[in-house]
Image (tube, rainbow, N blue to C red):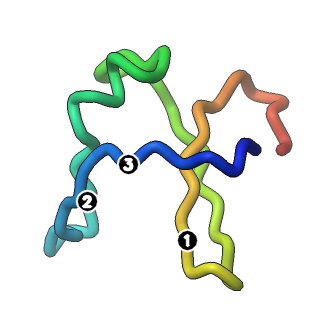
């Protein structure tokens, strides 16, 4: 993973555990509303969540 991070926006964790993704994610990634699935990873040392677009059923990264 590239070490250069691109800041997109800040959002509050909702009561029902949702996080809104910024609209700029559509312009910066090949994501489609209602279709794109994200894999969610936790970096415990850095206290970070990482979202990656799931490429397929066998994407075990």
On the rendered structure, is 61 left or right of 54? right
Q: Is residue 9 above or below residue 10?
A: above
Using the image as rendered, state which of residue 2 and residue 13 is in the foreground: 2
Q: Are marks 1 and 3 in contact (CB under 8 Å)?
A: no
Residue named by callout 2 = 18
Helix, strand or loop under label 1: strand
- The percent coordinates of residue 25 (x first, y second) are 35, 29
Please state, as top left, top right, bottom left or bottom right, where the N terminus lies in the image: top right
**Of callouts 3 and 2, which one flags the residue occurring earlier in the amino acid sequence?**
3
Q: Quadrant of residue 42?
A: bottom right
Residue named by callout 3 = 7
Q: Quadrant of residue 53?
A: top right
Q: Residues within 10 Å of mark 1 (few under 14, many from 20)?
A: few
- The percent coordinates of residue 30 (x first, y second) are 48, 15
On the rendered structure, is 30 left or right of 21? right
Q: Residue at x 47, y 21 (%)?
A: 29
Spatial separation of the CA atoms under disc 1 and disc 2? 16 Å
Q: Is residue 39 above or below residue 45?
A: above
Please state, as top left, top right, bottom left or bottom right, where the C terminus lies in the image: top right
- The percent coordinates of residue 34 (x first, y second) are 31, 22
**Of callouts 1 and 3, which one flags the residue occurring earlier in the amino acid sequence?**
3
Spatial separation of the CA atoms under disc 3 and disc 2? 19 Å
Helix, strand or loop under label 2: loop
Q: Which is more foreground, mark 3 or mark 2?
A: 3
Spatial separation of the CA atoms under disc 1 and disc 3? 13 Å
Q: Which is more foreground, mark 1 or mark 2?
A: 1
- The percent coordinates of residue 5 (x first, y second) are 54, 48
Helix, strand or loop under label 3: loop
Q: Residue at x 46, y 43 (%)?
A: 6
Marking on residue 48: 1
Count of numbered labels shown in the rendering: 3
């Amino acid at each position: 993973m590239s070490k250069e991070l691109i800041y997109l926006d800040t959002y509050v964790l909702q009561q029902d555990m949702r996080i809104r993704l910024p609209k700029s994610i559509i312009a910066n990634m090949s994501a489609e509303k209602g279709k794109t699935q994200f894999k969610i990873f936790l970096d415990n040392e850095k206290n970070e969540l990482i979202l990656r677009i799931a490429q397929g059923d066998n994407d075990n990264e």
